[in-house]
């Protein structure tokens, strides 16, 4: 039976297995890598959302889809990458929280989450990146990532702060994302996706 972790950003209530090291041991609102997307959404819901999801990948092996969170979730949106065969097997999942005009709070939560995960998971490396988002040619939109590598995947906590101009042009908002990547997904992203 899978070990259980629910990442709840607002309350930071973690139920974390002791020194787990498998990316599939983590769950975001009960959804984890290796499970079928069909365990959470119907095929009709998935196909409808695919028609609304923009993807720029050349490879058709894996597709991206997003869903708005429902019920009492602390997330506003879920993003998935899944294998495009009949299994709909999830290889990447993320939960997104809105931190509109509260980027300093986002950074505090990001660090708290990473510290809690490091205490309870066997990570092989930690990397922090800060860069300008490529979608904003003005260079005023920023991304701050903290990546933790596990033996078979990666956990990423990412704060995105968009410029005022971008927010006027697009429906994008400042966010904190918790992202779970399998090694299979990371390989595809680097070698096959584009």
Image: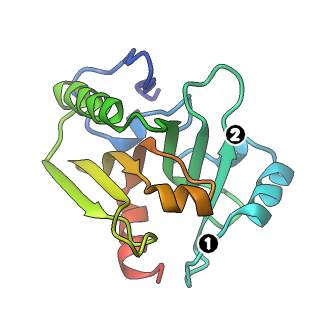
Residue denoted by label 1 = 55
Q: Does the image show residue 152?
A: no
How many residues crowd mark 2 within 10 Å: few (<14), some (14–19), many (20+)? few
Q: Which mark is residue 39?
A: 2
How many residues crowd mark 1 within 10 Å: few (<14), some (14–19), many (20+)? few
User: Picture coordinates of residue 22 (x, y %)?
Assistant: 32, 40
Q: Does the image show residue 137?
A: yes
Residue drawn at (45%, 24%), measured in percent from left and top? 6
Residue drawn at (31%, 21%), measured in percent from left and top? 17
Between marks 1 and 2 in the image, the one whose residue lies nearer the viewer: 1
User: Picture coordinates of residue 187 (x, y %)?
Assistant: 36, 70
Look at the picture and state if 78 lies above or below 14. below
Q: Is residue 89 left or right of residue 113?
A: right
Q: Secondary structure at mark 2?
A: helix
Residue drawn at (61%, 41%), measured in percent from left and top? 77
Mark nearer the N terminus (1 vs 2): 2
Look at the picture and state if 81 lies above or below 98. below
Residue drawn at (39%, 50%), measured in percent from left and top? 161
Q: Is residue 51 left or right of residue 95?
A: right
Q: Is residue 87 left or right of residue 44?
A: left
Question: What scheme was used to colour the molecule?
Answer: rainbow
132, 125: nearer the viewer: 132
């Amino acid at each position: 039976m899978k070990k259980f972790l629910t990442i709840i950003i607002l309350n930071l209530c973690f139920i974390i297995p002791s020194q787990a090291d498998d990316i599939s041991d983590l769950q975001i609102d009960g959804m984890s890598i290796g499970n079928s997307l069909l365990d959470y959404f119907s095929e009709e819901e998935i196909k409808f959302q695919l028609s609304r999801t923009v993807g720029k990948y050349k490879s058709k092996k894996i597709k991206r889809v997003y869903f708005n969170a429902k019920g009492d979730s602390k997330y506003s949106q879920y993003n998935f990458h899944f294998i495009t065969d009949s299994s709909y097997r999830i290889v990447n999942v993320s939960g997104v929280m809105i931190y509109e005009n509260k980027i300093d709070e986002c950074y505090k939560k990001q660090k708290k989450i990473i510290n809690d995960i490091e205490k309870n998971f066997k990570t092989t490396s930690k990397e922090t990146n800060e860069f300008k988002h490529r979608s904003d040619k003005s260079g005023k939109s920023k991304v701050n990532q903290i990546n933790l590598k596990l033996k078979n995947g990666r956990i990423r906590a990412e704060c995105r702060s968009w410029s005022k101009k971008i927010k006027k042009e697009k429906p994008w908002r400042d966010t904190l994302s918790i992202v779970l990547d399998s090694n299979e997904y990371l390989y595809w992203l680097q070698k096959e996706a584009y």
